[in-house]
Image: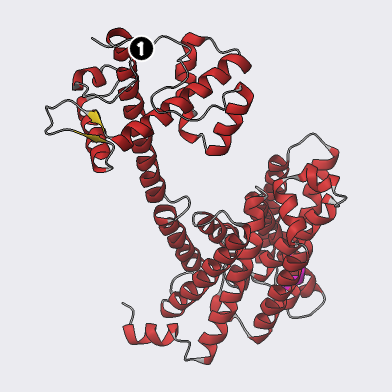
């Protein structure tokens, strides 16, 4: 069990070593959130995975070289330099494969990932058999060892974050164009290869810098998860980067604190699990793409569409009845029996009653009880007429300009009429030469017959 007072002390960063480790991990999380957002938008999440695995042979070769030269075999600086060189070589190898072969980028990344990682595993096995070496200390690069972060690591992470921020502000528009529209970026004279290289170099540096905190295996999750979580809250670019940086920083802070309170558990796994918690929370409660938000938005949309169908059904029933029994009389609102409304669409009784209840609440229809006929109010009649008119304008447009058969145009119009805004309706009126003032009791004739339901 974790002592609560000890955990609070760790969260408040009262100890110097804890403060250094946690702040360093926060810096890494912010950086991962920024760079990972570009990877996510660029649809290259696998690139971080390939680079993280590709650093393993660099670590092994650096260890062997340092041992052969008589230096400190487990020098952090030497191993990090080896990992960075290996990652950069993997980056350019992927680029060469994509440019000079017909192999797609995802396949190229998979090839480089497996080859480099397999080579790294072989090197680690060789290191185990060396008379002067042991690979025990190298496990911290694979699984992460947050407690081993020192002042020099903090300086490195701070320098790397400053570098990322400088590149972010200098090339923000260019990198956004690269992520969303390569053809347009190229037409504007931008060098796609240079921008790609810049992004991949930043990813490589972040990957190498995160090895001591998260480990080279789990750094990919720390790169992608905060950005994916932020994507659930916003669609604006700047807001996405800010949210990803905040989620990455919070994940680093809480994960490092838990790692300090639970030293027997792998720190990298704890940090990634905290980031995963933020992702799951965002997936459920995100205000832009969260499951609950999408469910309620879909429910509201279905209710709005169903209400429009109800109003149009009532208007068309009144219109058909007026044509048969009151020829020449101006259309007026009259009570309509439930069974006639029910026959207009494939509504169930329960669904139709819910729509009527909702429309009554909005003041669009009225009736004395659930057995009484439904009648449009003055506002409901006006709304029903406008909805019906927009529907018929779209039908006429499909018939005249899209060659849709009149007997099928009703179903096609149903899919679009609910998103027709004022500008689209005005555009339809102009193209169909139907700019006459809106009259709720005299609409354009339907292009297909509207028969009453008996």
Compared with 123, 440 (above or below) is above
The colouring scheme, among rainbow, by chain, secondary structure or one colour, is secondary structure
Q: Quadrant of the C terminus?
A: top left
Q: Position of residue 341 (x, y in %)?
A: 25, 21
Residue at 74%, 56% in the rendered image: 175
Predominant secondary structure in magenta? helix
Q: State left or right for residue 301 relative to residue 56.
A: left
Q: Is residue 120 magenta?
A: no
Q: Is residue 82 magenta?
A: yes
Q: Position of residue 65 (x, y in %)?
A: 79, 70
Q: State left or right for residue 204 relative to residue 349.
A: right
In the image shown, does 258 or 416 lie closer to the viewer?
416
- Where on the picture, by quarter, is residue 207? bottom right
In the image shown, does 297 or 197 lie closer to the viewer?
297
- Residue count near mark 1 (Cα–Cα under 10 Å), binned few <14, some 14–19, many ≥20: few
| Residue carrying label 1 | 328
Residue at 62%, 27% in the rendered image: 430
Instruction: Give the magenta part as a residue range.
Output: 79-83
Question: Can residue 116 be seen in this snapshot?
Answer: yes
Q: Position of residue 402 (x, y in %)?
A: 61, 17
């Amino acid at each position: 069990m974790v002592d609560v007072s000890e955990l609070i002390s760790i969260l408040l960063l009262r100890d110097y070593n804890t403060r250094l480790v946690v702040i360093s991990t926060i810096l890494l999380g912010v950086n991962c959130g920024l760079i990972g957002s570009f990877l996510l938008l660029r649809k290259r999440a696998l690139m971080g995975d390939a680079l993280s695995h590709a650093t393993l042979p660099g670590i092994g070769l650096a260890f062997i070289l340092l041992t052969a030269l008589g230096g400190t075999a487990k020098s952090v600086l030497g191993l990090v330099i080896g990992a960075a060189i290996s990652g950069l070589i993997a980056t350019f190898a992927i680029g060469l494969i994509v440019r000079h072969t017909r192999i797609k980028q995802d396949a190229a990344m998979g090839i480089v990932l497996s080859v480099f990682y397999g080579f790294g595993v072989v090197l680690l096995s060789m290191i185990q058999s060396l008379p002067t070496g042991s690979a025990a200390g190298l496990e911290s690069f694979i699984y992460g060892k947050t407690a081993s972060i020192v002042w020099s690591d903090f300086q490195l992470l701070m320098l790397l974050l400053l570098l990322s921020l400088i590149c972010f502000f200098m090339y923000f528009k260019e990198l956004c164009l690269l992520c969303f529209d390569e053809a347009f970026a190229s037409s504007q004279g931008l060098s796609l290869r240079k921008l790609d290289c810049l992004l991949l170099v930043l990813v490589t540096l972040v990957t190498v810098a995160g090895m001591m905190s998260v480990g080279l295996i789990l750094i990919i999750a720390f790169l992608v998860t905060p950005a994916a979580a932020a994507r659930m809250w916003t669609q604006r670019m700047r807001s996405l980067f800010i949210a990803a940086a905040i989620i990455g920083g919070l994940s680093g802070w809480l994960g490092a604190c838990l790692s300090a309170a639970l030293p027997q558990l792998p720190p990298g796994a704890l940090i990634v699990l905290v980031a995963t918690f933020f992702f799951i929370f965002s997936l459920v409660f995100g205000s832009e793409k969260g499951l609950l938000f999408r469910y309620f938005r879909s429910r509201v949309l279905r209710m709005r569409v169903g209400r429009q169908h109800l109003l149009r059904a009532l208007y068309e029933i009144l219109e058909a009845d007026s044509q048969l029994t009151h020829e020449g009389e101006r259309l007026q609102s009259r009570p309509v029996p439930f069974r006639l409304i029910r026959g207009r669409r494939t509504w169930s009784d329960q669904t139709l009653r819910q729509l009527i209840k909702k429309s009554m609440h909005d003041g669009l229809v009225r009736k004395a009880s659930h057995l009484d006929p439904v009648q449009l109010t003055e506002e409901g009649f006006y709304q029903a007429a406008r909805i019906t008119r927009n529907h018929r304008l779209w039908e006429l447009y499909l018939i005249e300009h899209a060659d849709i058969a009149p007997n099928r145009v009703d179903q096609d119009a149903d899919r679009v009429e609910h998103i027709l805004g004022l500008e689209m309706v005005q555009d339809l009126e102009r193209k169909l030469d139907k700019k006459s003032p809106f009259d709720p009791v005299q609409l354009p004739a339907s292009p297909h017959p509207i028969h009453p339901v008996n």
